[in-house]
Image (cartoon, rainbow, N blue to C red):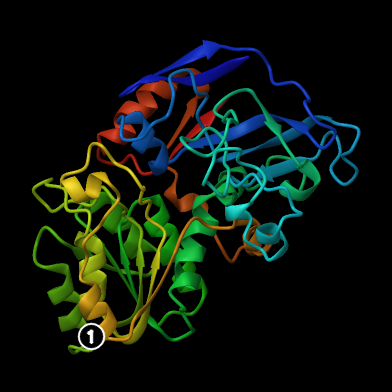
Amino acid sequence: MKAVVYQGPRQVAVKDVPEPPIEAPGDAIVRITTTNICGSDLHMYEGRTNVEEGKILGHENMGVVVETGPGVTRIGVGDRVSVPFNIACGACRSCETGWTSFCLRANPMDGMDGAAYGYAGMGPYDGGQAEYLRVPWADFNLLELPPGEEHENDFTMLSDIFPTGWHGTELAGMEPGDRVAVFGAGPVGLMAAHSAVLRGASEVYVVDKERDRLAMAEKIGAVPIDLSEADPVDQILAATGGVGTDCGVEAVGYQAHDPSGTEHPELVLDNLVKTVRSTGGIGVVGVYLPEDPGAATEAAKQGRIGFDYGSCFMKGQHIGNGQAPVKRYNRQLRDLIIEGRARPSFLVSHEMPLTEAAAGYESFDRRDEGWTKVLLRP
């Protein structure tokens, strides 16, 4: 089969690789119909992780089941499914309490709870930027979708970024009527803003410097804040009469940078501490790593981010963080799509055949204007 393979910093190629076999009774093989390039994939693409060469990438996947192991009883051949990026066993303490993003059994790496497809440090699993994907514990992990091709571009967001954006608002403790600040207007930030609107926010402020992304935020009912024009904290405080927002979402991560392009890994955390009112909440879904050899400071290279924790403490703010447990939200989000309430496909800017993945990665990584979300079709 054809698959997108990591070959080194800023080098991916579509290669012929063996098709995945059934390895355990609970496995299923999914023929991929749509797979996305995620902003998190760019961390690997840019050489900012320890991903090994030869890794098949891709953790945002959906498709149709073509084969199942003898232990699979709920999912059947021909089912159209969304594949959560979390690989979860369904039986450990984390899974039983709804935290599939921290499964205790799926990742054999020492000290690492949680597994995912095609990602550095998240286990030995191949990704789905390919024609076929093996899904372990298929009965537990797969989400059934209506048959056919309707809502394909909406449903493909269910594997990661829509639940991740929703999770950001959940971690922040958002309630209906809240003012919400979202830092980062990439795909996850825009999904967090979309989620906040769906959940009844009174106002949503989205901070970024890319005008095309800020324009998309405005179209979904958010207030765009251009950090290249003035300090984003000052802009939001002025708009809220000096009060600030009730909560905020960090959707940028460890490669946060100022308008000049200089990295400051603490920048967004500091800004959220200043922006969110006392006793408000902050949900961090931007990626941070325990090690980052390419970081701007020696401390950050060791995963130590020196943000303004003292002010956070004095303001009584609470911070929630971590990867989204997709299964906690994906059924409800699927139904919001089916009923026409949610339209996450507004993000999609480019649909490309799998064979053009290298060009898609290159343009998305450069943040070329208009490149907001890339879908690949095997």
In screen coordinates, is 109 left or right of 310?
A: right
Which image quarter: residue 248? Answer: bottom left
Observer-nearest of 43 and 61: 43
> Where is the N terminus found, in terms of image quarters?
top right
- Toward the top, the furthest residue is 16
**Which residue ends up furthest to the front in the rendered image?**
110
Foreground residue, 83 or 80?
Answer: 83
Q: Nearer the viewer, residue 264 or 207?
A: 264
Counting from the top left corner in percent of width and height, residue 340 is at 61, 63
| Above or below for 350 versus 206 | above
- On screen, residue 49 versus residue 73, left or right, reads left
| Residue 221 in view here | yes
At horizontal 40% and vertical 51% (from top left) the residue drawn is 187
Residue at 26 percent of width and 39 percent of height:
367
Residue 234: name its quadrant: bottom left
Residue 280 pos. (x, y %): 36, 83
Q: Please provide percent x and percent y for residue 89.
A: 72, 48
- What amino acid is found at the position of numbered circle 1 in the picture? Thr
Residue under numbered circle 1: 240
Q: Is residue 304 left or right of residue 331?
A: left
Residue 275 shows up from this direction: no
Q: Helix, strand, or loop for circle 1? A: loop
Task: From this view, report whether residue 244 is shown above or below residue 132.
Answer: below
At which x and y percent is residue 186?
34, 51
Q: Residues within 10 Å of mark 1 (few under 14, many from 20)?
A: some
Q: Quadrant of the C terminus?
A: top right
Question: Going 31% across and 35% down the picture, which residue do you hit?
Answer: 48
The front one of 158 and 267 is: 267
In this image, 364 relative to 68: left or right? left
